Image (cartoon, rainbow, N blue to C red):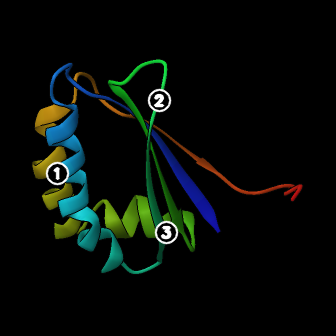
Amino acid sequence: MIHEIATLTIKPGSEKAFEAAAAQAVPYFQQAPGALSFRLDRTVENPSEYTLTVGWATLEDHTVGFRNSPGFTKWRELVGPHFAQSPEVRHLEHVYVGF
């Protein structure tokens, strides 16, 4: 499993609208081949910063399959207007899990 970790900086004052748009977009991830989980967290110290964590079966499920799909286009149409800057995205794989 690969985790896509995206840091999303949202325009101040758009946080609630962004959260609603992200919730509306969840079905696009659920329908994506290889998508395993979806989580959105808000940074306590900086309420305009969010971390999106999406579990994918493979890296290509995200970088090729989802990014080239109509679902990705719909996701960006919904949440993109709320971005203060481009998302910072990286991919992680578990090496060790404690408990």
Q: Residue 68: give x, y in percent of width and height.
A: 26, 64
Q: 23 or 29: nearer the eye? A: 23
Determine which quarter of the picture holds residue 48: top left
Give whichever of discs 1 and 3 has the lower sequence position: 1
Which residue has dot 3 on it? 37
In the displayed structure image, the side of residue 97 where residue 14 appears, left or right: left
Tag 1 secondary structure: helix
User: What is the number of the mark on residue 86?
Assistant: none
In the displayed structure image, the side of residue 48 where residue 56 appears, left or right: right
Vertical arrangement, residue 8 with respect to residue 54, above or below: above
Query: Could you tell me which residue is drawn at 16 percent across and 33 percent down?
Result: 82
In the displayed structure image, the side of residue 75 where residue 31 appears, left or right: right
Which residue has dot 1 on it? 21
Q: Could you give the CA–CA distance between mark 2 and mark 3, rounded to whole angstroms?
A: 20 Å
Q: Residue 85: give x, y in percent of width and height.
A: 27, 23
Q: Could you give the CA–CA distance between mark 1 and mark 3, rounded to whole angstroms?
A: 17 Å
Q: Residue 59: give x, y in percent of width and height.
A: 54, 63
Which quadrant is home to the N terminus? bottom right
Give whichever of discs 2 and 1 has the lower sequence position: 1
Q: Amino acid at mark 1?
A: Ala
Vertical arrangement, residue 13 with respect to residue 31, above or below: above
Vertical arrangement, residue 47 with respect to residue 61, above or below: above
Give whichever of discs 2 and 3 has the lower sequence position: 3
